[in-house]
Amino acid sequence: MPAMTTLAELPIWTLLTRPSLEALLSRDGSMPEAIKIAADLHDVSVADAPLLALTRLMIQRAQALDGLTLTATGALSRIDVRAFFDEMTWPGYDKANVLVMNKALNEADVMPVEITRRIAQDLKLLRKRERRLLASKAGTMLVRENQAAALFRQLFATTFWEINLAYFDRVPLEAWPQNHIGIVLWCLSVAGHEWFKAEDLIRTCTVWDDTLDEGPLDFAGFAFESRVLRPLTWFGLMETRLEGEDDVPDWRRARQYRKTALFDRALRFEVQMNNPSGVSH
C-alpha cells in the first residue's frame, strides 16, 4: 500500500481548484473578491493591532498639533518620530537596541514609524501641505473608536495589495511572494496554527520560483518573513516569539510565528478544494 502524502510534503495551494487559485490572485492591484474581511469584525478585537494603534496615534497627533512636521525629504521630524517611538508597541521590535544604535531618531531609523506614515499617506489618511502632514477628512473619520474595523479593512488591503513591501527590505526579489499574497494567506490559514519558522513553510505556502534556487536561500526566507509574516503581526493576525531559552543571545535564537485566533475570525476565503486521493489533512 503506498504511503500517505502529508500536507507538509506538497505545496498546500495544490489542494485548491484552478478557478480558486485564480480567484485569489489580484488582477488590478486590489484585494481579490475571494478574500473577505469578516463583516461582523468587532472594533474592540482589532483596535489594539500595532499598525492600527500607531496609525491612530499619528492622526491624533496631527489633529492636536495642526499637522506633523516634515523634513525636506518628506520624512517625519525627529520630534514626531521620538513621540511615536515612545508610545508605540511593535511585535519583534527591540526598542532598547534601537536607542543603543542611534543617538537621535530619524524616521529611517524607526521602521514601524516610516512604514505607518507611508501607508497612512498612501491611504490618504494623512495629506501633505507644504512642510506639514495633516489629518484628512477620511483620517478624522476613521480614527474614531467605532471605526476600528473599517480602518483595519482599509489598512489590510492597502498594505498587502497596494504598498510595495519590497521597498522596506531591499531584497532583490522584486514582488515575490507579495505578487501572490492571496494564495499565501490561504495556505497560512491551513498550516499556520502551530509555531513555525519561516523556512518551515516557505515552500509549502508560496508559489516557488525556480530562479530562487539560483541565489542565496536567505533572500527568499527573508522576503517571506518581511513581506508576509511580519506584516501579519502588525494586524494582530500572527504572533511571534524567539525560540529557545531567554538566557541565549537573541541573535542565536530563531524567530517563530503562529496565527492568532483573530486570523480565522477576520479572514474569509471563498475557495473550493480538490479531493485528491492519498492526501491527509
Image (cartoon, rainbow, N blue to C red):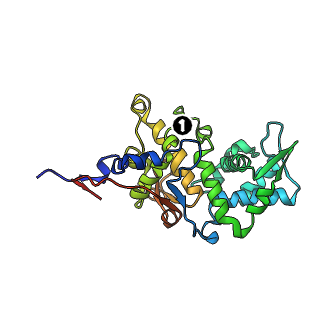
Question: Disc 1 marks which amino acid?
Answer: Ala
Task: Relative to 269, say whether 164 is above or below.
Answer: above
Position of 226 compared to 217: left or right? right
**Quadrant of the rendered structure where residue 236 is?**
bottom right
Q: Quadrant of residue 84?
A: bottom right
From this view, report whether residue 197 is shown above or below residue 87. above
Measured along the vertical axis of the image, is residue 195 above or below residue 116?
below
Instruction: Give the total number of marks visible in the rendering.
Output: 1
Q: Residue 2, how many percent across, how many down? A: 14, 50
Q: Which is more toward the observer, 186 or 113?
A: 186
User: Which quarter of the figure is the C terminus placed in?
Assistant: bottom left
1 displayed left or right of 64: left
Give whichever of 85, 133 is nearer the camera: 133
Classify residue 18 as left or right of residue 28.
left
Residue 73 in sight: yes
Residue bearing the label numbered 1: 175
Helix, strand or loop at mark 1: loop
Q: Residue 127 or 252: which is nearer the viewer?
A: 127
- Percent across and percent down for residue 19 are 41, 47
Q: In the image, is residue 203 above or below residue 59? A: above
Q: Is residue 253 visible?
A: no
